[in-house]
Image: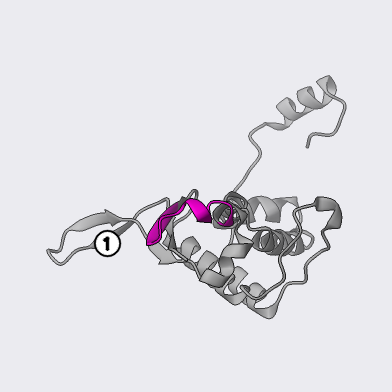
Amino acid sequence: MPVIRLQSARPEIIVNEDGEEVEAYYFQELPPGAIKHCHYISGMIDAVPDSCADILVPHTDHLLIKFICAFLQEHQDDEEVADDWAKKKPRELTEWDKTNLEPIVGIPLVDLLKASSFLGCQLMLNAVATYVGSILVTKNEKEVQDYFGVYREFTKEEEEQVKAKYPQPFF
């Protein structure tokens, strides 16, 4: 089986041995037993050369790549998650999930959802979505905005105009 490495989409700045700052992308090997959870990768595994393949994962930096590989390493022996939404059951978060997802807040959490979706990793997508849901139920609107760094772009007057024009609740 070829070695699959995940590559970050955003470079990090490192200092080389000459003392110069350079941009570098992060690569990490995907655990072989975890490939079954990444439908994007498992679907193309036959087309990969025998040696190595690097897969650029959008919306990621080195920390998210490290998390993705650690998550897949931790859960490589877990049962595969069905793709059919009708057959999905809510997934209980493990202690590992809770402990390791807690430091990832705001936009990086959204980026992790995007990366999980890109890889076709339902197991991780379900875990992150369950974690986000457990956070959101305990927060009010202002706390959610602060958590994700998202704020309303409309003034109260503009909101009233939109509500009058479109009676369905958008806000």
Q: Specify the segment rendered in magenta.
A: 42-55
Please tell me in which quadrant of the rendered image residue 14 appears: bottom left
Q: Which residue in the protein does label 1 denote? A: 14
Q: Nearer the viewer, residue 74 or 98?
A: 74
Residue type at tag 1: Ile
Label 1 neighbourhood size at 10 Å, few (<14), some (14-19), many (20+)?
few
Query: Would you say 163 lies left or right of 120 here?
Result: right
Q: How far across and how far down the image is residue 23, in percent?
A: 28, 54
**Any part of residue 103 in sight:** no
Please tell me in which quadrant of the rendered image residue 113 appears: bottom right
Which residue is at 63% across, 34% downward? 153
Which residue is at 19% across, 64% downward? 16
- Asked if the magenta segment contains residue 142, the reply would be no
- Secondary structure found at label 1: strand
View extreme (top): residue: 165
Q: How far across and how far down the image is residue 73, in percent?
A: 55, 74
